Image: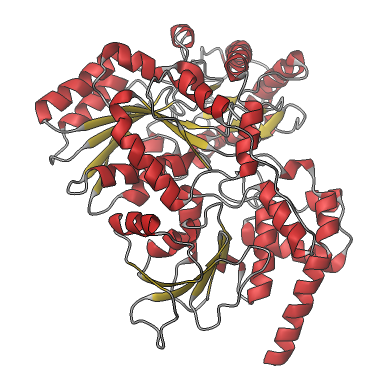
């Protein structure tokens, strides 16, 4: 039976490889980019099984691939091509798909294991240099690196082969619990590692192999010789990121494979900068779910998290002040804010906000850092604005570059520091290099080719959002009789550079509606609008330059990791927030506006009137 199983696995692998040329010839356009429709996600496991069934039952074509749907809704979580590549490794090694993950980083597969268990790593070649090992150990990782496999398996530790083999030449790992090679992680089903936790580590702290790199590896598996493109100069890109953030720091911006690895490196750098202290991160309770969960993943013996509430009518500055006043301890504090906030689109009075932070620093005697997520408005020059008030506060801008800067063509992220944050930026650079979380050549080249003009794109997208927002409010007023406000940046915010093209809103609750009807109203509205797939897309993210209006309900998508009680505070009359995000332009603005009008009428099922506010 074992021999028969082995033969079947070899045949399956051979059939898989034989189908790769047809696959790469037929990849649908919807598989590229960074965002994918989120109404019918399959999961990696279901998508993989469906792909294998397709190989055994019918010919590969663009339409047959399109019908498979999508494994996940965002590049950093999983892509169809990364899942197909992982399916190959699961066949090759005879393990189930949850035990295989590809990473953009060569080191983060080890971190995914180290977060769960001590490791003894047998290193083939000098893949893990001493600086990398030092950073990992400084962050509390229980890691022993040896050059030869021990005669007996170390007690209480996983034995891992860390190989210099390429992704297209997977090595044997007989006698080991796991193998890591060229960003690929494979671990045995009986080694005690939690598959959900390894996936969560990749989802929040790293990313899969980029789509162009997946294509290269798949080509290489067929025996094809592949040459990666030459790296373009990043000088103009880095200067532009610094200018948009308003920084005059001599330390250059640091670019990462995606946004959250940037934040993860920032947190790790604080731990390295203050090796004897406990760091506390203070952030909004309803911040982007990815940032929130990543912060949770860092909580430990030397890292705490505290939150402030900005939902509804809550005052941003007063909420921050209240939370800071309740902090205990003496270690450094990082105040992590989104300008504008997600999904409320609030921008606090900067003078009042910085006074609150300064007063806390003075009264507590603690070191205080400021981290501002400006992803919604990269050209805001926020560090220059902060510098006009105080030059001594170490401040950094954090930007997810997968939105307006790359035009949605690749994932990436960056940290930009002011002069006061120079020492911290050195540590961020050390961590990035140690964890190998910079982007690959494909990602870097895409950024180099698309960063110019982002100021104009962001402004035009804001203007489009504003225009359609007026139509939305008028339509709701006509149908319900209610003046529905938008959670949107103010005209003054926009004039100050915070030109977000995203807003959220609570649809007025229909009269006499059941609790179930109220709870479903936001998603019902999204479902109705997305029927027009030419103009609307049920999807997370924003800042895409693809002529599609993105629609989502944050409570069930971008805020998946947020506590239910915090999400409940942003509902009104039992109705959750709906979020719209706008591209630079659409094919026909009047068609989009008419779609909004029809959608409002359909979601209420009436031609006018009939709503009350609870």
Relative placement, left or right, of 355 versus 182 is left
Relative placement, left or right, of 44 versus 219 is left
**370 versus 564 height, above or below:** above
Q: Residue furthest right?
A: 59
Q: What residue appears at the point 27 percent right and 31 percent down from the top-left corner?
A: 369
Q: What residue appears at the point 24 percent right and 41 percent down from the top-left corner?
A: 280
Q: Quadrant of the N terminus?
A: bottom right
Work out whether residue 252 can be spotted: yes
Q: Which residue is more in the foreground, 325 or 371?
A: 371
Relative placement, left or right, of 10 versus 97 is right
x, y percentage for residue 189? 52, 76
The picture quadrant where one finds residue 409 is top right
x, y percentage for residue 121? 42, 71
Q: Which residue is more in the foreground, 73 or 13?
A: 13
Q: Quadrant of the C terminus?
A: top left
Q: What residue appears at the point 31 percent right and 15 percent down from the top-left corner?
A: 387
Relative placement, left or right, of 131 versus 444 is left
x, y percentage for residue 462? 58, 15
Here the colouring is secondary structure
**431 versus 218 height, above or below:** above
Work out whether residue 508 can be spotted: no
Tag count in the figure? 0
Q: What residue appears at the point 41 percent right and 37 percent down from the top-left corner?
A: 567
x, y percentage for residue 481? 55, 12
């Amino acid at each position: 039976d074992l021999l028969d199983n082995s033969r079947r696995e070899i045949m399956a692998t051979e059939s898989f490889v034989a189908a790769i040329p047809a696959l790469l010839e037929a990849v649908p356009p919807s598989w590229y980019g960074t965002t994918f429709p989120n109404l019918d996600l399959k999961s990696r496991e279901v998508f993989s099984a469906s792909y294998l069934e397709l190989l055994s039952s019918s010919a590969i074509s663009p339409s047959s691939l399109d019908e498979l749907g999508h494994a996940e809704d965002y590049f950093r979580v999983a892509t169809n091509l990364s899942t197909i590549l992982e399916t190959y490794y699961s066949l090759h090694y005879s393990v189930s798909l949850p035990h295989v993950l590809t990473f953009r980083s060569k080191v983060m597969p080890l971190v995914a294991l180290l977060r769960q268990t001590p490791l003894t790593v047998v290193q083939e070649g000098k893949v893990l240099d001493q600086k990398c090992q030092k950073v990992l150990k400084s962050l509390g990782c229980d890691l022993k690196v040896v050059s030869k496999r021990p005669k007996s398996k170390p007690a209480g530790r996983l034995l891992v082969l860390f190989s210099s083999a390429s992704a297209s030449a997977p090595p044997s790992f007989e006698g080991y619990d796991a193998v890591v090679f060229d960003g690929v992680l494979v671990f045995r089903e009986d080694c005690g590692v939690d598959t959900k936790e390894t996936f969560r580590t990749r989802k929040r702290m790293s990313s899969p192999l980029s789509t162009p790199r997946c294509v290269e590896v798949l080509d290489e598996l067929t025996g094809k010789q592949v040459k990666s493109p030459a790296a373009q100069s990043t000088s103009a890109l880095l200067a532009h990121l610094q200018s948009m953030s308003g920084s005059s720091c001599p330390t250059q911006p640091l670019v990462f494979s995606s946004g959250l690895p940037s934040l993860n490196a920032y947190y790790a750098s604080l731990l390295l900068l203050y090796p004897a202290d406990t760091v506390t991160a203070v952030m909004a309770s309803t911040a982007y779910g990815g940032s929130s969960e990543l912060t949770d993943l860092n909580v430990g013996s030397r890292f705490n998290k505290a939150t402030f509430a900005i939902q509804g009518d809550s005052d941003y500055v007063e909420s921050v002040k209240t939370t800071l006043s309740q902090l205990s301890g003496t270690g450094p504090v990082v105040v992590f804010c989104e300008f504008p906030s997600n999904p409320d689109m609030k921008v606090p009075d900067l003078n009042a906000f910085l006074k609150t932070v300064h007063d806390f620093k003075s009264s507590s005697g603690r070191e205080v850092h400021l981290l501002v997520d400006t992803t919604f408005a990269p050209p805001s020059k926020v560090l220059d604005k902060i510098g006009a008030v105080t030059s001594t506060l170490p401040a950094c801008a954090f930007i997810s570059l997968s939105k307006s800067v790359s035009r949605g063509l690749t994932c990436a992220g960056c940290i930009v520091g002011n002069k006061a944050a120079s020492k911290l930026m050195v540590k961020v650079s050390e961590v990035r290099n140690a964890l190998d979380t910079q982007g690959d050549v494909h990602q870097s080249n895409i950024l180099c080719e698309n960063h110019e003009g982002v100021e104009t794109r962001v402004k035009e997208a804001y203007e489009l959002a504003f225009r359609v927002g007026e139509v939305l409010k008028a339509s709701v007023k006509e149908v319900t009789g209610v003046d529905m406000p938008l959670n949107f940046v103010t005209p003054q915010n926009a004039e100050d550079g915070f030109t977000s093209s995203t807003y959220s809103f609570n649809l007025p609750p229909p009269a006499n509606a059941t609790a179930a009807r109220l709870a479903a109203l936001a998603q019902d509205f999204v479902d109705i609008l997305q029927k027009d797939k030419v103009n609307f897309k049920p999807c997370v993210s924003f800042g895409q330059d693809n002529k599609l209006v993105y629609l989502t309900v944050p409570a069930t998508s971008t805020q998946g990791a947020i506590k239910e009680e915090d999400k409940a505070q942003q509902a009104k009359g039992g109705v959750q927030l709906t979020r719209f995000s706008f591209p630079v332009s659409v094919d026909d603005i009047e068609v989009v506006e008419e779609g909004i009008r029809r959608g409002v009428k359909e979601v209420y099922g009436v031609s006018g009137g009939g709503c009350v506010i609870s």
